[in-house]
Image (spheres, rainbow, N blue to C red):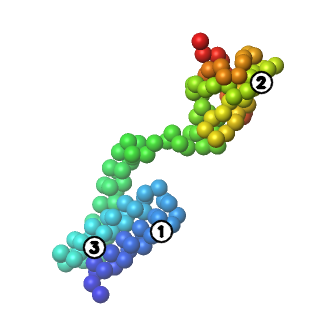
Amino acid sequence: MHDYHYWLIFSLILGIIELTIGANFFLMWCGLSALFVSGLTYLFAWPLEGQWIIFSIIVIVVLFIWQKFKPKFMSKQPSIMLNQRAHQYLHRELYLEEAIVNGFGKVKIDDSSWRVEGVDLPQGTKVKVIGIDGTILKVARIT
């Protein structure tokens, strides 16, 4: 078996591990670097030490480029809202499903009903979510 086969197998193993454990693209870039070295080794006869040096250089360069451009491709927004569903409704305009009586009422958002807190208002009034207190949305009337 030629050396390029080993690099090809190494690339596939790294890709499978990346897909299995999700190493935040680190192993994907290493696998693509191994694939590149496999192609170079197929075209040129390189000593094993040279192959590893080229692999190392390519990995370092690719990871440096990935770290520089990663913020453009990976948004941190979803992880900020994780387990804080109510926060995504801030500043949203809604209509009261149930009147606010004694400071509390309900709104319907998509397929869920949410308890709201605010000044007493009749059913059907347009309100805006101005704050969150646990699972209670604080609302104000829109005029």
In this view, the residue farthest toward the right is: 102
Q: Which mark is residue 104?
A: 2
Q: Residue furthest top?
A: 143
Query: Left of 25 or right of it: where is 44?
Result: left
Can you tell which of label 2 and label 3 is closer to the viewer? 2
Quadrant, the C terminus? top right
Please determine whether, in this image, residue 111 is positioned above or below residue 9: above
Please tell me how crowded label 1 is: few (under 14), some (14-19), or many (20+) other residues with Cα within 10 Å.
some
Identify the image quadrant of residue 123.
top right
Mark 2 and mark 1: Cα distance apart in space: 51 Å
In the rendered view, tell whether residue 83 sits above or below residue 15: above
**Secondary element at image label 3:** helix
- Left or right relative to 27: residue 113: right
- The image position of residue 18, as x and y in percent, is 46, 64
Q: Which comes before the other along the chain, label 3 or label 1? A: 1
The residue where tag 1 is placed is 17
What's the residue type where badge 1 is placed?
Ile
Q: What residue is shown at x 51% (from left), y 66% (from top)?
A: 20
Q: From where the camera sits, is residue 130 visible?
A: no
Decide which of tag 2 and tag 3 comes sooner along the chain: 3
Q: Residue at x 42, y 63 (%)?
A: 27
Q: Which residue is mark 3?
A: 38
Provide the secondary structure element on which disc 1 rests. helix
Q: Residues within 10 Å of mark 2 (few under 14, many from 20)?
A: some
Name the residue rendered at 41%, 42% in the picture: 71
Give whichever of 35, 99 is nearer the camera. Answer: 99
What is the C-alpha distance between the residues marked 2 and 3? 66 Å
Marks 3 and 1, how far apart at CA: 19 Å
Query: In this orientation, does residue 10 appear?
Result: yes
Q: Amino acid at mark 2?
A: Phe
